[in-house]
Amino acid sequence: MKQGNAVLSGLGTTVFESMSRLAAEHRAVNLGQGFPDDKGPEDMLRIAADAVVDGWNQYPSMMGVPELRQAVARHENRFYGLDVDWQREVMVTSGATEALAGALLALIEPGDEVILFQPMYDAYAPLVRRAGGVPRYVTLTPPDWRLDIAAVKAAVGPATKAILFNNPLNPAARVFGEPELRDLADLVVVNDLFAICDEVYEHIVFDGRRHIPLITLPGMRERTIKIGSAGKTFSLTGWKVGYITAAPELLSILAKAHQYLTFTTPPGLQTAVAHGLEKDDGYFDGLAQEMQRRRDRLTEGLRRTGFTVLPCEGTYFVNIDLSDAASVDDVTYCRRMTEEAGVTSIPVSAFCPENPVTTVARFCFAKQDRVLDEAVDRLARWRDSMG
Ligand code: PMP
Ligand code: GLN
């Protein structure tokens, strides 16, 4: 028998799927996979339902329905002051994941190097490799996960084509601020790189922080692909509606990848997301405030239980430092936590392809209060039982 593709056949099942399966097996409270247990905004659900029943359900334009592309352009202007031409600079994708895959397929030639910052979303390295690229890792370390620009410089070489940068960063829960972003943008410009920016958590930032898209920094407008997702911004992760903002020359290549990947995205969902992006500031502020409240609730509970909780500036996630709680690595610890305590988290080593950090576990706090409280109670009982 011939073999299938070496990159894909060499991969395991994603950590989200395997930890969710383990959680179900042990009836654990699942704070592993990152998704909110809210229904999502009622008005958007209604618009989508009406659009499916009464509207057009055939292929929409491959670039996305005009309403949504216009809404994305207005969103980029309203929140970040960007001047975006919706017809030449916006494309709708089937989730941020398709946007990431398409961007890599569109930009990478075999052997091109791509700078990745670990810990990172687990799809990145396989997507780079499957596109023929070679990942070069820059490691951020807890507790502050700072971007060491000297380490980025050291990773850049003649074959470097792009950086793939996630801000706010899953799983480290960092929101990179102006000084780090300036250094990074300078480096990207000086080395003539592309920046693929995964900003799906752009509206989930806490304590008065402001998300700054890398595309807004000097010299970045022409070389950056900014990716957003309705999944995170409207707590509708199953919809898989994503959007790209990029300069026309870049977007036209990305469109070629998109036309042969998914071509389009369900029209009714696009219409509802267009409506969502036009919501007033109260919605966006409310989302951040509500997620911050849940962060605080879980953080306080974990601290009361005796865990060392790392700072969380944004995203759905808080991390605990296991270095003094456990004599085992994070994978073993998270497995035991599911089996013995009935609470599931994700070992952060799963987000590090090279020399992984093995002392951190990630919890998703985008859950109802009673779910968070139940998880904390179970963890307290588990810690007590260990004496
Ligand atoms: N990037 C990051 C950092 C994520 O955490 C996720 C997933 N939740 C995605 C991309 C994928 O987004 P989507 O569901 O829109 O494909
Ligand atoms: N992005 C989500 C997380 O980090 C999970 C996405 C998925 O399950 N594929 O948990």
Image (tube, rainbow, N blue to C red):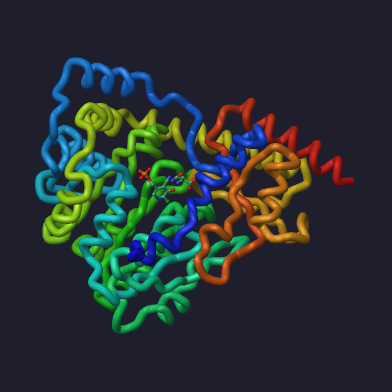
Residue 11 percent coordinates (x, y): 45, 60
Q: Quadrant of residue 61?
A: top left
Q: How many marks?
A: 0
Residue 63 percent coordinates (x, y): 14, 43
User: Where 235 falls versus 89 (above or below)?
Assistant: above
- Left or right, residue 179 beside residue 363: left
Residue furthest right as drawn: 387
Name which residue lies at 43% across and 75% down. Answer: 152
Name which residue lies at 52% across and 53% down. Answer: 171
The foreground one among 180 and 115 is: 115
User: Where 179 falls versus 330 (above or below)?
Assistant: below
The quarter of the image holding the N terminus is bottom left
Name which residue lies at 26% across and 65% down. Answer: 218
- Left or right, residue 111 beside residue 34: left
Residue 182 percent coordinates (x, y): 37, 67
Name which residue lies at 16% across and 20% down. Answer: 55
User: Where 126 falls versus 19 (above or below)?
Assistant: below
Residue 287 makes an appearance in the image:
yes
Q: Quadrant of residue 43?
A: top left
Q: Quadrant of residue 130?
A: bottom left
Residue 183 makes an appearance in the image:
no
The foreground one among 354 and 309 is: 354
Residue furthest front as drawn: 1
- Left or right, residue 168 beside residue 130: right
Residue furthest bottom as drawn: 158
Residue 34 percent coordinates (x, y): 50, 42
